[in-house]
Amino acid sequence: MILRPVIVRIPNAPAKGGPRPARHLSTNSATHSAANADRPRGPAVRALQQEYSRKAIAECARRMGLPRTGWSKDGDGRPMPLDGAYWSVSHKPHYAAAVIADAPVGIDVEQLLPRRDESLFDAVATSGEWSAIGERSWESFFRLWTAKEAVLKANGVGIGGLPQCRLAGVVDAKLMTLTFEDRSWPVAHTYFDGHVVAVTTLGRAVEWRTLPTV
């Protein structure tokens, strides 16, 4: 099975901002909040992002010949398989992304927006991981952050699992391997319009599709 992630632009999204203020980081939850500091707040904004996440998963299902509706989450917010198909969604202010597979899968999108708190680098990865990735830049940070988020989603684990999710190796600019609970997780990336998206590949080819809207 070829993975066919779908990325959809969210219309009428808030304007893109600049660098975000520093935050003191003491827990994985604080790390998650700081790394996602560009996420607009408010019920109307969240409703719009959720609407386009549903549209993204529906378009992904259409491309794979699967039902466009019926994709639901459990009481803890984890996606529930539909007829043996696993799925994952992610959204930021300007884009929503979705993927469907025949095994647990995860996807994450982030805007490449620098933060002012460089302690995030050490909160997200070890010095060995940064040596493997080659540099401490914000592009590398969000590449690694989205990869770890995608792996944790595929395992149905929240941000509390971040310390157990480690970079095992970098293949090239768009493929790396992570480990979580003694299992290897290949992760592919794509870059567009100041954003990066990561998806766990299950060792398969990935055909990305970005849509202006649906």
Image (cartoon, grey):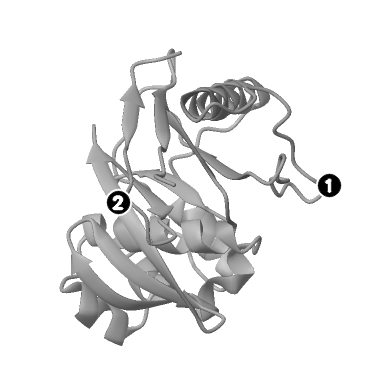
Residue nearer the viewer, 15 or 206: 206
Amino acid type shown at disc 2: His
Q: Residue at x 44, y 13 (%)?
A: 12
Helix, strand or loop at label 1? It is loop
Q: Position of residue 79 (x, y in %)?
A: 69, 45
Q: Which mark is residue 169?
A: none
Q: Does residue 147 appear to the left or right of 55 in the view shown?
A: left
**Which residue position is annotated with label 1?**
75
**Which residue position is annotated with label 2?**
189
Q: Position of residue 59 (x, y in %)?
A: 50, 23
Amino acid type shown at disc 1: Gly
In 3D space, how far apart are the residues under numbered discs 1 and 2 (Cα atoms)?
30 Å
**Visible in this render: residue 114?**
no
Q: Position of residue 192 (x, y in %)?
A: 24, 35
Q: Dot 2, crowdedness within 10 Å: few (<14), some or many (≥20)?
A: many
State which tag comes first along the sequence, 1 or 2. 1
